[in-house]
Image (cartoon, rainbow, N blue to C red):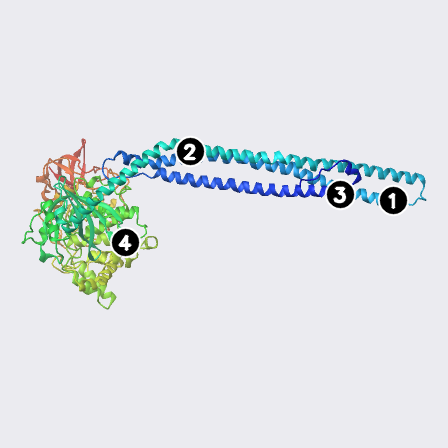
Amino acid sequence: MGLPALEFSDCYLDSPQFRERLKSHEAELDKTNKFIKELIKDGKALVQALKSLSTAKRKFADSLNDFKFQCIGDAETDDEICIAKSLQEFAAVLQNLEDERTRMIENANDVLILPLERFRKEQISAAKEAKKKYDKETEKYCGVLEKHLSLSAKKKEAHLHEADNQVDNVRQHFYEVSLEYVFKVQEVQERKMFDFVEPLLAFLQGLFTYYHHGYELAKDFNHFKTDLTISIQNTRNRFESTRSEVESLMRKMKENPHEHKSISQHLMEGYLFVLEKRSFVSTWVKYYCTYHREPKRVTMVLFDPKSGGKMGEEESFILKSCTRRKTDSIEKRFCFDVEAMDRPGVITMQALSEEDRRLWMEAMDGREPVYNLNRDSQAEGMAQLDVIGFNVMKKFIYAVETRGIDEQGLYRIAGVNSKVQKLLSLTMDPKTCADVELDSPEWEIKTITSAIKHYLRVLPAPLMTYQYQRSFIKAAKMDNPETRVTEIHTLVHRLPEKNRQMLELLVNHLANVASHHHQNLMTIANLGVVFGPTLLRPQEETVAAIMDIKFQNIVVEILIEHHERIFQDVPNSADGPNNMPSNQSRRRSTESKAPSCSERPLTLFHTPTHSQKGEKRNSVADVQNSTNCNNCSSSSSSSGVGGGGSHSHTPRHSLTSNDGEPDSRQTRPSSLTTSPSPASPRSPSWPMFSAPSSPHPVSSASSDSSPASVSGRKAIALYACKAEHESELSFIAGTVFLNVHASREPGWLEGTLDGRKGLIPENYVEFL
């Protein structure tokens, strides 16, 4: 049964039946209000779910669109092309469908949620307010009526008449409120039939539109779906027909692998183990190597399938030669040595079998070993303790001290091997050494420090020599710490001069590094661990030698901690085959003759004071080594560095002057204590030697320094020099002087430059 009708006349009677009928209408309104409230909540949840569904479908469509099929081979069939683009078609359909869903979701709020909320607030809430007013007037009318009826009839007539009027007014107002309430209740009951249902119809219409759009998309997609189905079936059929052939080929490969191994005339590739020396041990590292016959380029990629297949950086070099390794020269089998055009040293490789080694050697045009090859010839092409080596080391050290001395893990963190080899190749090559700028971001500090260590490792013999290696170890094993220092001090001064000079250069640098250990974390002990096995590597790698590594580290620690005492003071017991008696100085006095090019310490900048130049004109001012590596090597050879030239001056190790008087002792200058002069004509970057302008062979000025022999000749500058007196000439390396002749000042020449005459340091020029 439906709700009973509410008659306006019943408002005046206000009967119990009227009240019951009114309550039934009120209960229906409460039920409708709760239903609409739940419907709005469910509608919002539905819209949010549709949004989430749309987001998920769009993400799914994006994943389909991003994936690209990669078919085997360099061409695709039509079926494969159709299958390959199917995912993009699927994604396009889904995106189109979701675009329509998005429009439906955006309209759902306007056509469903807002109308329902408006009906609930404007109609049902208004009916509730009318009920509150009706209940309040009912209570008021009943109270006034009861009070009026309790009046005594004995009251005055005027008073009773006034009370009657008051009751009539309250009753009239009550009737009006009752009529309004009944009208509102019935109005809401009637309005909900359309105000409530119409938004639902609009929402369903949006759903129908969305589904109809999907139906239209399905019709449009039907043609592609048919083609795709055919392509899938064709591809499946081809797969089934070729699978048996592939399996047959696989079985043949398993049974006879050598018959089916692919061998190219232009390419050889496969895994090789490469011998790498790391610290004090030799390690075999697995590389995948590729050799191209035409450019003779070998490419190596660090790769080990056992470690998860992580691939390292690619290294490459140009092959110079390939030689089979003698079985008795190495404990490993299947080994061969290769030499590179663009990196120093010999690379030892191990093939996987004898047959594999044969194939590699055939591809690389390998040769059999020369059995009478001695150690010196094997070391040919390696780093040497020559002028080039000294200047390279100084250049590296200067870069480390100016750019990264505070960098944590200095010398402990290794650089990329290919970059280290490239840096050494460039700096050791006279043609490219001057072009290397170590302040470039290309050369990381770890690359430079690794280059320093690698240079020391590839020397033909360790810097502290095989001859004294056991003596240094024995000294480190002494019980008394002071005795250790004294013995090591003595042994250092027994080293060959070039070895001692390079060791001094290195140790002074390491002492500087250790002084910054709070920043770089490289204490003296840490530096000993890094450089001990390098400076004192044994001649043979044995268990006993490995056990002595800790003592090698101690030797380096002592050198660093006591570097000033060890290198600046000559001990009384330093006599040896390479040293003269200790009561005489290593250097000749400058009163006798200015030092030649080979006799000057190979320092970065040698800057004497002005007073020294005034008193003894045989010293030089603010020297910046900036002549070409190749020419400096030739100059050094002719000046006595290599000992190959004939000279009229006293040799480097002579301890007396020309008149037989003993030399005055001089302090060895520090290799890295001074900085480039701001007035230097070259750039602030570390200079290498620049080539002289004349192609003719040069000879040392000091070897032909008498006034008769030098009068009126041309000379070329080997070094740059900045004048500190108006009578001197400033010049850069490569400058040509005219009319050069002897000067009254010992150690100086007079020459003409740009029409101006002046003094030139004798040891800074070579005669043409």
Towards the viewer: 650 or 735: 735
- Residue 395 in sight here: no
Q: Earlier in the sequence, mark 1 or mark 4?
A: 1
User: Callout 1 environment at 10 Å: few (<14), some (14 to 19), or many (20+)?
Assistant: few
Circle 2 — which element?
A: helix
Alpha carbon distance from label 3 to label 4:
102 Å
- Tag in front: 1 or 4: 1
**Residue named by callout 4:** 412
Circle 4 — which element?
A: loop
User: Dividing the picture into quarters, in which one does residue 160 lie?
Assistant: top right
- Residue 400 in sight here: yes
Left or right of 70 in this view: 689 = left
Which label belongs to residue 17?
A: 3
Q: Earlier in the sequence, mark 3 or mark 2?
A: 3
User: Callout 4 environment at 10 Å: few (<14), some (14 to 19), or many (20+)?
Assistant: some
Q: Earlier in the sequence, mark 1 or mark 3?
A: 3
**Residue named by callout 2:** 96
